Amino acid sequence: MTRALRWIVCSLLIVLAALTAAASVVALFVHTQVNDTDSYVETVAPLAADPAVQAAVADRLTEELTRRLDGFPQVLTRPAENLVREVAFTLVSSDQFATLWTGVNRQAHAQLAAAVTGQATDGIVRADDTGTVTVSLEPVMTELRTRLRDRGFTLVDRLPAFDPQFDILQSDELVQAQRWSNALDRAAVWLPWAAAICAVAAVAIAPQRMRALSLVGLATAIAMIALLATQTVVRRIYLQDQDIPSPAAAVAVYDTLATSLVSSIRVLLACGVAVAVVGYVAGSSHSATSMRSRISGRVGKSQDHLGKLDL
């Protein structure tokens, strides 16, 4: 194989390594959130302490409960709304809400995964034709009714049982997202290996291996920067399309769910930059050789200076 042909094959492998590295980050994120309940619960647990989410949940509980008081005399229902709102906000600000939130999401995870992957859902998580995925707040509502009863609001016992829902995801392209989710979930097993094999093969076949190593790191870093930019654009588009009562809660939910993805991208970006620098410094280019010579000279002078001080 000629030198030129080796560089052509090396370049193709470098591009493939960068693309599969970017795809593997997304695939592993989807795979983790879909299949690992503990990881998902750990991701969404901080939302229980987010003021925007607390306010959205409290508003939802208040709205659902007071709406069912419409058939009662106004002399009873008018002061009831303020009491319900007060107790609801007290509940969502408590440690008990954090426990309830964790329990709800742990139960919901399997059905949320089914909704995202397009499987049938019937239970604590629901997905409708508009692309909205909701989670049941029934355990939280049960606790709210108990607290209202303890406050002397016995009218709550005359209300029928109902299941309030909280929107956690809304996308008109949910069906398309389901197809991508299924594909990425299946690819998560082999994509990281494919990226590693392409990177190793690119370095092995290159006429100048250190230069190829540097290019692998640079291409990976560029791919991660592009992925970060794509995530930012997707976030903006997603939040602009939201038609829900609490945009602030939608922001909190999206940012929390995307935290592990963004962190993984940044780690690979840093690794790519580090590999690029190491490959460049260890390479045989004139600039790299000169840099090593200057560094070696300065280290030698420092050692000589320290030796004189010891004398």
Image (cartoon, helix red, strand yellow):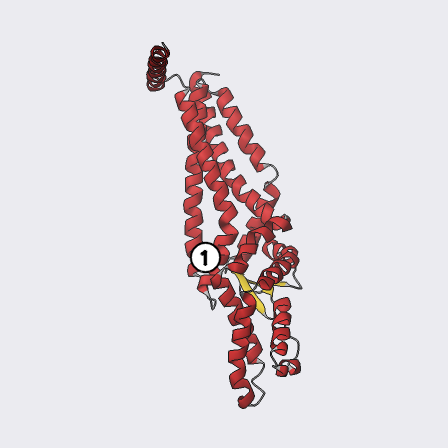
| Residue 269 placement, left or right of 285 | right
| Residue 165 placement, left or right of 285 | right
Q: Position of residue 65 (x, y in %)?
A: 57, 77
Residue 230 visible here: yes
Q: Identity of the amino acid at label 1?
A: Tyr
Residue occupying the point 52% across, 41% down: 25
Image quarter (top left, top right, bottom left or bottom right) of the C terminus:
top left
* Residue found at the far top of this picture: 311
Identify the image quadrant of residue 150: bottom right
Other residues around mark 1 within 10 Å, as few (<14) / some (14–19) / many (≥20): some
Residue occupying the point 60% across, 61% down: 101
Identify the image quadrant of residue 215: top left
As rendered, which of 207 and 215 lies closer to the eye? 215
As rendered, which of 45 and 37 lies closer to the eye? 45
Q: Secondary structure at mark 1?
A: helix
Give the mark count: 1
Above or below, 155 against 89 in this view is below
Residue occupying the point 57% across, 47% down: 30
Residue 119 visible here: no
- The residue where tag 1 is placed is 238
| Residue 142 placement, left or right of 220 | right
Above or below, 220 against 284 in this view is below
